[in-house]
Image (cartoon, rainbow, N blue to C red):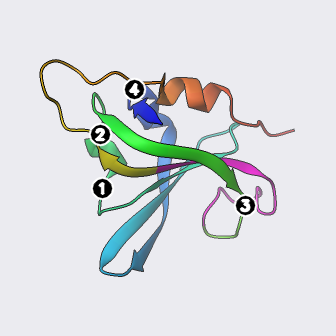
Amino acid sequence: MLIKIDSAVRRFGLANLVAVRGETRRYYAADAPHLMIVVTHQNLVLGDLPGRVVDAAIGWHDGKYGFVRPGNEDKRHSKLTIFSVVERGKGEPKFDETLAQVLADAPKEG
């Protein structure tokens, strides 16, 4: 799935870093009331991606401690996993959704 990273990026804060096979994966938690995390692979930094289109997958996260906002542990979260940036050829790559659209569909607290 291709996702355009937009201004919704400012709604996420870094929650954790994990080293896996020579790469750093970064875990970002959305601000309240959203129950959503973004995971970046290949040493990508979410704050560097606005305006870019990324290859990603949408799934679920079980709300493990250290990966979500305090008080939301063990709650089901949407998870956007970003694998790579789609390189630009002529013009902007087409995309399926924006980060803001994915965030709007995420579960909410309460």
Image quadrant assignment for residue 31: top right
Q: Is residue 77 left or right of residue 103?
A: right
User: Which of the two residues, 66 or 101, is positioned nearer the viewer here?
Assistant: 101
Check disc 4 and give the amino acid type.
Answer: Ser
Residue range in magenta is 67-81
Whichever of callouts 4 and 2 sits on the residue coming sooner in the sequence is 4
Q: Which residue is mark 1?
A: 44
Whichever of callouts 3 and 2 sits on the residue coming sooner in the sequence is 2
Q: CA distance from mark 1 to mark 4?
A: 17 Å
Whichever of callouts 1 and 2 sits on the residue coming sooner in the sequence is 1
Q: CA distance from mark 1 to mark 2?
A: 8 Å
Check disc 2 and give the amino acid type.
Answer: Leu
Q: Between tags 1 and 4, which lies in front? A: 1
Dominant secondary-structure state across the stretch colored magenta: loop
User: Which of the two residues, 15 or 95, is positioned nearer the viewer here?
Assistant: 95
Q: CA distance from mark 3 to mark 2?
A: 24 Å
Q: CA distance from mark 4 to mark 2?
A: 10 Å
For numbered disc 2, what is the local secondary structure?
A: loop
**Residue at horizontal 30%, vertical 32%?**
50
Q: How many marks?
A: 4
The reply to whether the magenta stretch includes residue 71 is yes
Q: CA distance from mark 3 to mark 4?
A: 24 Å
Is there a contact, CB below 8 Å, between mark 1 and mark 2?
Answer: yes
Mark 4 crowdedness (10 Å alpha carbons): few <14, some 14-19, many ≥20: some
Q: Position of residue 49 (x, y in %)?
A: 29, 39
Q: Which residue is mark 2?
A: 49
Q: Is residue 4 left or right of residue 43?
A: right
Q: Position of residue 38 (x, y in %)?
A: 51, 49
Q: Which residue is mark 3?
A: 63
Whichever of callouts 1 and 4 sits on the residue coming sooner in the sequence is 4
Whichever of callouts 1 and 3 sits on the residue coming sooner in the sequence is 1
